[in-house]
Image: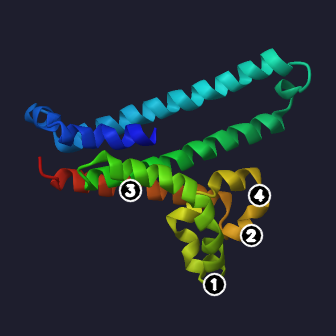
Amino acid sequence: MVAAAATMITMEFQFGTIKHVLTQRYSRPLVLVSKWLVLLTYSLLLYVGSSLFAILLKVCLVNDKFAIFTRAKFWHDWLAGVGGEFLNTWLLLSLVLLIAALFKSSGAAVAVGIIGYFVLGMVNIPMIALIRKYTWLKWNPLNMFNFSAQLGLPTLSKITNLTDVQLFWGNLAYIILFLVLGLLFFRRREV
């Protein structure tokens, strides 16, 4: 999804197809928002599809071993985890979309998305130490990536210094901020 998010914007500029799209009756913001909606649909289909596939595998392979269909807590925790991962995915995608709006090559946006995903674990440890020293750093976007982990392990709130609700709204705020900034840069970008 990171590669799709990066290339859906930059490839239009690399191959010059954006000129044809913008000569139509569509405005730049409308073109970009339509790309976001396609990516949102794509990500929703992937998350719903993979969730249904996981349930199907459970039923087919270990149906009698776990009685998950009668446990409400399991469903609540599982759906919260999937929702948290979806929100964290969109935080990463919104950052990738912002970078894609800034650069002419999709490589930079893809690299930031993929490398950022893997480096996040290494950056998390020093970030936690900084949050302890400077409490205002708890609102940085990297801390927001702890949302899905904290949903599964509530004691993580002592490390992030944020509640689940604060992390939820922080994720949404950063997603909107990155998308709006991406829209502003996309509007001013030369064709």
Residue 66, compared with residue 34, is above or below; it is: above
Secondary structure found at label 4 = helix
Looking at the picture, which amino acid does disc 3 mark? Phe
Q: Nearer the viewer, residue 112 or 156?
A: 112
The residue that disc 1 covers is 133
Q: Residue furthest left?
A: 23
**Earlier residue among tags 4 and 1:** 1
Q: Label 3: how many residues lie within 10 Å, few (<14), some (14-19) or many (20+)?
A: many
Q: Are marks 4 and 3 in contact (CB under 8 Å)?
A: no
Q: Circle 2 sits in a helix, a strand or a loop, which is it?
A: helix
Residue 117 placement, left or right of 102? right
| Residue farthest to the top, as pictured | 60
Q: Is residue 32 visible?
A: no
Q: CA distance from mark 4 to mark 2?
A: 9 Å
The residue indicated by pointer 4 is: 154
Distance, label 1 to label 2, CA atoms, is 14 Å
Q: Position of residue 150 (x, y in %)?
A: 70, 56
Which colour assignment does the render follow?
rainbow
**What residue is at 54 percent from the left and 52 percent from the top?**
117
Residue 178 shows which numbered tag?
3
Q: Which residue is mark 2?
A: 158
